Amino acid sequence: MPKTTAAPDVPADAPIDAPGCERCRNLEALDFEFSFAYQPIIDFHARRIFAHEALVRGPQGESAASVLARVNDDNRYRFDQACRVKAVQGAAALGIQEFLSINFMPNAVYQPEACIRSTFAAAQKYNFPKERIIFEVLEGENISDRPHLIRIFEEYKRFGFQTALDDFGAGYAGLNLLADFQPDIIKIDMDLVRHIDTSKPKQAIVEGIVHIGRQLGIRILAEGIETRAERDFFLSCGVTLMQGYFFSKPAFQAIGSIDASAWQ
């Protein structure tokens, strides 16, 4: 498990006049329900589960799309905050001992040091160590203010959270973003992963990403692994963090189990 530093307390004097901070104090309930499925992220070299990603689902296990279709500019902030709390609550109830990876919406974060309060409160309430939380953001998400995203990442890192950039290679700001901020983990987009064992262009691109990660001290994670050949290509590149149906499908309100043959 990666080495972590002691996280500072949330400042008692975190700005209360920043946009959105009033919302932190007066969150209205959402008018729709949602839950989570948890998918393991494995460390193949260590032969163990490294983390579990919390994936939003409907209350009966419906698709993420059915939930995200209900999110709009009026409830985006409340949804983002509710996701953090519910993901931590669910992980604690399931007895997850590894890292917990939570997706966040940068356009829903107003003042990072103030908006992070709900996560700290949930970690404390449900007795889930905050040092085991990873915040990840989609590279392809429409980021209206990149400096704001960088500031969010810097604050999360300062408070001891791990950070990850998801779907790397699917958007347009990845390399420019890396020049300004280096997350702990880069998750290679599954479109690059699919059939990579037979695609020379994809292999060249991924090998370049792996090289950049080594140079910058960033761990590389291959997501969407579905075949042994895809797994073996990444192992040949020295990538040992992996996620995908080849290892385990997301488990609704449960911890996914690893197929024993996936280790062979």
Image (tube, rainbow, N blue to C red):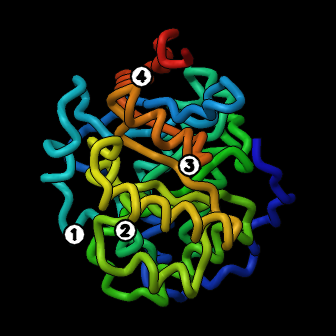
Nearer the N terminus, badge 3 or badge 1?
Answer: 1
Foreground pick, 137 / 201: 201
Residue 237 numbered tag:
3
Taking 141 as reference, is 163 left or right? right
- Which-is-in-front pick, marks 2 and 1? 2
- Which-is-in-front pick, marks 3 and 1? 3
> In the image as oriented, which residue stretches furthest toward the top?
260
Residue at image coords 35%, 60%: 78
Q: CA distance from mark 3 to mark 2?
A: 23 Å
Nearer the N terminus, badge 3 or badge 2?
Answer: 2
Give the quadrant of residue 36.
top left
- The image shows residue 74, relative to residue 39, as above or below, that is below
Q: CA distance from mark 1 to mark 4?
A: 35 Å
Foreground pick, 208 / 58: 208
Q: Which residue is mark 1?
A: 74
Q: Which residue is mark 2?
A: 139
Q: Residue 260, percent across and down?
A: 52, 9
Assign the C terminus to one quadrant of the image: top right
Residue at image coords 50%, 30%: 40
